[in-house]
Image: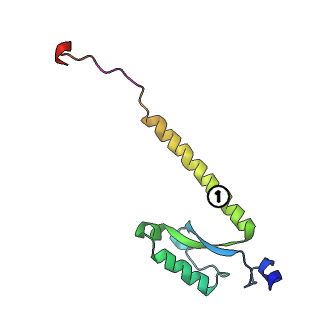
Amino acid sequence: AIVDAYREDPGNPRYAFRHLLFSVTEPSQRVKPVAASDIMWAEAMGKLEGMDSSDRERLWPQLVQGFKDLSYRLKELSSHLGALQCQMADVQKRLSVPHRSPAPSPLPPHLV
């Protein structure tokens, strides 16, 4: 049984490193993964139902099997984060206004 838990095989129902993680997914790609058990799927769908409607519209459970899939997911998320950070830096540059001294007041100093 322990050996089966570590044997990475798509048809191995005892493989221990199989999880459903939520990802932004296009509606046309939203299907139950073949290797996901009915129990895993029901739990994931229950979590999805408990989310805000904006999250339910974007997220879908995706099967991650083993460290290779997890590593791939990390690379994808890191790449996406890098792109978002570049966009944020561009927005910050556009929003930054050079510091200017306030315009002199037309009122005499004793009235300011």
Q: Is residue 18 left or right of residue 102?
A: right
**Element under disc 1:** helix
Q: Position of residue 91 (x, y in %)?
A: 47, 41
- How many marks do you count on the picture? 1
| Residue bearing the label numbered 1 | 76
Q: Residue at x 70, y 62 (%)?
A: 72
Please, is residue 83 above or below residue 11 in the view? above
**Residue 108 can be seen, yes or no:** no
Magenta span: predominant SS is loop
Q: Residue furthest right?
A: 3
Q: Quadrant of the C terminus?
A: top left
Left or right: residue 38 compared with residue 87? right
Residue 102 lies, in percent from the top left, at 31, 21
Query: Which coloring applies here?
Result: rainbow
Query: Quarter of the image containing the N terminus?
Result: bottom right
Rendered residue at 64%/84% (across/down): 37
In depth, the one of 109 and 58 nearer the eye is 109
Q: What is the quadrant of residue 66 in the picture?
A: bottom right
Q: On the rendered structure, is 22 left or right of 18?
A: left
Q: Residues within 10 Å of mark 1 (few under 14, many from 20)?
A: few
Membership of 92 in magenta stretch: no
Q: Is residue 23 visible?
A: yes
**Image location of residue 108, percent across then percent down:** 18, 13
**What is the x, y in percent for residue 81?**
58, 52
* Mark 1: amino acid: Glu
Instruction: Tell me where the magenta segment starts and ends, as one range.
Output: 99-103
| Relative vertical location of residue 107 with respect to residue 23 in this rendering, above or below | above
Please report the residue visible at 74 percent of the width from the left and 84 percent of the height from the top: 14
